[in-house]
Image: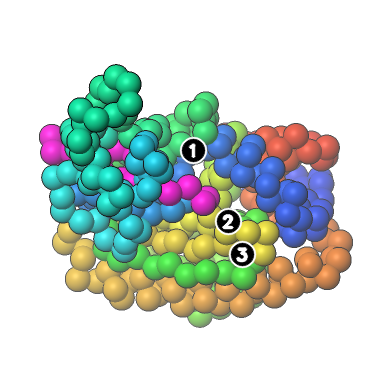
Amino acid sequence: MAADGAPVVSRQFLSADHYRSPDAAERERAIYAPHFWHPLVPLSSLPEGSALALELLDLPLLLSHPPGGPPQVFLNRCPHRGVALLSPAAEAQACRRLVCPYHGWTYGLDGLLRAAAREGEFAGAFSRQDWPLVALASAVRGSMLWVAVGPDPLPLEQQLDLMEQELGAELERPRVLLASLERELACNWKIAHDNTLDDYHVAIAHPTTLHRQQGPVRHYRHRFAMHTNLLATPVVNPGQSGSGAKEFLTFGAPPWIHWLVWPDGRLALISFPPLDPGRCRLQVWLLGDPSQQPRGQEWIEELGNFLEEDRVLVEAAQRGYSSGLTPGPAHRLEARILHQQALYARIMGLVEPPAPSASA
C-alpha cells in the first residue's frame, strides 16, 4: 500500500483487443451489462401520470409513472405482436393510458391490459390478466431511475458501495434535473470510462477547466471499495481559510458511470453506454436543488467544456488502440483505471493479473 493510501500499481492495462473486438462487445452485452443496474432518467423528468420511451443497449424501454405509485420500466413492445406502444422521445409525455397503434390493445401506466379490440373474437379463451407488459426490475437512487437488464443483478447499494459510505443520507436528498447533455463518441466505452478515471491527465489536458476544480495533485485523496472508487479534492469556501475546506468528489463505478459531487449539493451523473465496439454515448445529468435551476445551463456548459477536451483525446486513443497498440506502464495516478479494469476482468472471466489491493 502506498503512503497516500492508494493501491500499489502492480499490473498492466487490459489489452487493446478488449477495446476493438466485436466478440468482446457481444460478451459484454451478455455478461457484463446484465450484472449491473443502469441509470435512465432523473425522477423529476418522469412525473406522475407520464410515460417515456427510450433505448438502452438495443433494448426498447417504456418508462411510466402511475399516479400514486412508483415509476416502472417495461419492454416497449405490445405482447400481442411486438409493436412499440410509444415512440422514443426527448421528454416524457402526460398520459393516462398506453394504446398500441397496431391493434389497439390498451394498457394502464401500471402495465396491465385494460382493453383489447374485439375481445370476444380471439381464437380460444382470452383473459386480460394473462397479457401484461413485460416489466424489468427498477429502482430509484440518487434521484435517478435505474433499470436492471439482467435477471440477477448485483444489488444497487453494492454497485454504489463507496458512494453509500461517503455520502450516506446526502445521496438520497431529493434533487431535480438542472440541465443535461448528450452526444456520441467515436470510441469504445472503456476508453471513455478509463479516461474519466484517469487522474494522471487532468493537470496536463485540462489546465483551465477541470484542473481548476480539482486543484493540485498533492491534495488528491483516493479510496477504493469493492465496486466503486473515489478521487476527493479540497474546495475552499470563498472567504474562509483552508480549515473550512470541503471536498469535490469524483466517483467511478461500474458498469460505465461516474458521479461528480460538489459541496453545494450538486450531483452530475455521467454514463457511457456502448453503441458498438467503436462508439459509445455520452450522457450527463446535472442534478440539484430547485433553487439552483437558474444556473443549470451555465454549469452544464462548464462541464461540456472539459468533456469536449476529453472527446478529442478518447477518439484519438481509440484510433491508437485500433492500430495495434500495446498499452504502456500504468502510473500511480491511473490506479482507479486498474481498479475498474480488474472488476471488469473478474466479471468477464478473463485471465488477468490480480487487482491492486483495495483500501476502504
Instruction: Locate the C terminus by quadrant.
Output: top right
Mark 1 = which residue?
149
Q: What stretch of residues is rendered in magenta?
A: 57-73
Q: Residues within 10 Å of mark 1 (few under 14, many from 20)?
A: many
Q: Secondary structure at mark 2?
A: strand
Q: Nearer the viewer, residue 125 or 265?
A: 125
| Sequence-first tag of 2 and 3 | 2
Location of residue 314 (image quadrant): bottom right
Kind of residue indicated by mark 3: Arg
Instruction: Give the residue type that dot 2 points to.
Output: Pro
Q: Circles 2 and 3: CB distance less than 8 Å?
A: yes
Q: Quadrant of residue 20?
A: bottom right
Mark 2 surroundings: few (<14), some (14-19) or many (≥20) residues within 10 A: many
The reply, left or right, for residue 246 in relation to residue 93 is: right
Above or below, 225 relative to 295: above
- Residue 130 in percent (x, y) is at 31, 23
Q: Is residue 32 visible?
A: yes
**Position of 59 relative to 184 (above/below):** above
